[in-house]
Image (cartoon, helix red, strand yellow):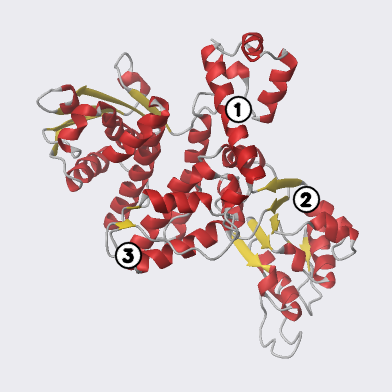
Amino acid sequence: MLEFMHASEQQGKGHSEELIEYIARTAGQFFEETYRNEHGLTELLDEEQYARLIVGLKNKIGGDFSLLSKEKDCVRVVNNCCPFGEGVSSSPELCRMTSSVFGGIAARNFGYAKVEISKSIARKDEGCEVSVYLNPEKGLHRPGLEYSRQKNTAEKGAADDLHYQIEESMQKIWRLKHTKQAKKQPPVIVAKSPVMQDVLRAIEKIAPTLAAVLINGETGVGKELVAKAIHAMSDRNDHAFMAINCGAIPETLIESALFGHEKGAFTGAIDIHQGFFERADGGTLFLDEVDTLSPAAQVRLLRVIQEGELERVGGKRTLEIDVRIISATNRDLNKLVEEGVFRKDLYYRINVVNLLIPPLFQRPEDFPYLVQSILQRLNKKYNKQIESVSREVMQQIRSYRWPGNVRELENVLERAVLFTTDAEITVLELPDSEPLAQDWGGIRDSVLFSAERTFLLGSLQGCQGDVKKIAESMGLTSRAVYGKLKKHRLDPRQFRN
């Protein structure tokens, strides 16, 4: 953490605080999940359980916390040994780690929390004293950081809050599905890059609707993960999410897989079979590689979407179903329609909302967080203790094009983890491919886009959203600046008093 802080200071205090907040919230979720698995808990925590959790987790990572008092809507803990050691004195902002871990867990279970750190080893006090107020009235007029279950996305840090809300919804579904502790890790979306934060904002708008969604993106960008996020943020999140890879099922079986079949419908049909549509009734059905559907399957799918009813293969009884369709493809469906390969009427039905997931090389800000997330998962899978990758390896990762996107990154890191005996990966074997560094046009556009966005953000903050002042400083017209703000999806009103 101290090394992270030192590195992030080069990018400004705001970046350091964002890093602390992100890691703290992620860590808090991990600690809570572990506590729930150990004690077999599925309901919201009560104050007694919450107090045991926060004291226990801090002590497990090197602190010396104990419960000072527990009264209605307020838990107080004390500590005389900081988990970060003496280094915390030069980085007192690390106290926010404790605040955000305690506050995030409390907000998830009680709806609200205010964390007050009245004494701190980082401030040269003899020990730490932390009070967690569990309702607004109790915390009124007390200093500290506030946390709430529902975030206001109009505030500063809206993208991080939205990211957290989506991840929280996905973890809730995962926790209900995996009642016992499983080796499989909960799903995580990494979205520190502006383009992926745009995807999060789109998910927030799309999810509450009933609109059919078509997700476009290269192989391995995480289309199914985005589909799960849409389902998790929708009103259907307490019903099934079913995923089917249309390209992995033989053409002769795809109709049976989707719509089911009756006994005796064909050779080998020895019993009634419910298809994916029936099993997803009330929930969401994700059709990956939808472009591979046969003409016959396309016709039946169109009818199900239009009429909300189906007949099993070989059946005569009409079944009513209520399923939201999310489709995905890595091909240009519009071109396939022009070629007569894909039905035009079906294309319009599944493409009510189109969502494009950018390739990995267009998301350079996500690399450090993706690498850490993947390493955590691989450490658990192979019982390893690999903490990070070297600076040279990270440079390799940033300069490679990644045609297989996140899936390829996971594969390459997994191979490296298997052959690494130290705490840091220093060698990464990448396949022979044209490196991203040779794509000058892509690098230039990416750097200019990022630099322009950073400048506009700083100008909006410095000028408090006054577009006229920004235009004067840039030597442009106000109309031109508004155009740039629109391109970067920045709203000047959010920066005004």
Is 257 left, or right, of 237 in this rendering? Answer: right
Question: Which residue corresponds to mark 1?
Answer: 452
Which tag, 2 or 3, sits closer to the chain's start?
2
Determine whether label 2 and label 3 are within 8 Å by CB: no
**Which quadrant: the N terminus?**
top left
**Residue 279 shows up from this direction:** no
What number is the disc on residue 351?
2
Q: Report, in whole angstroms, how far the alpha carbon at label 2 lies from the one at label 1.
A: 32 Å
Q: Residue at 55% across / 27% down in the picture?
A: 454
Q: Position of residue 103 (x, y in %)?
A: 33, 33
Looking at the rendering, which quadrant does residue 476 occupy?
top right
Indicate the amino acid at tag 1: Glu
Looking at the rendering, which quadrant does residue 474 occupy?
top right
Looking at the rendering, which quadrant does residue 342 occupy?
bottom right
Question: Which residue corresponds to mark 3?
Answer: 420
Front one among 257 and 26: 26
Q: Report, in whole angstroms, how far the alpha carbon at label 3 lies from the one at label 1.
A: 40 Å
Q: Position of residue 141 (x, y in %)?
A: 31, 13
Q: Position of residue 48 (x, y in %)?
A: 23, 40
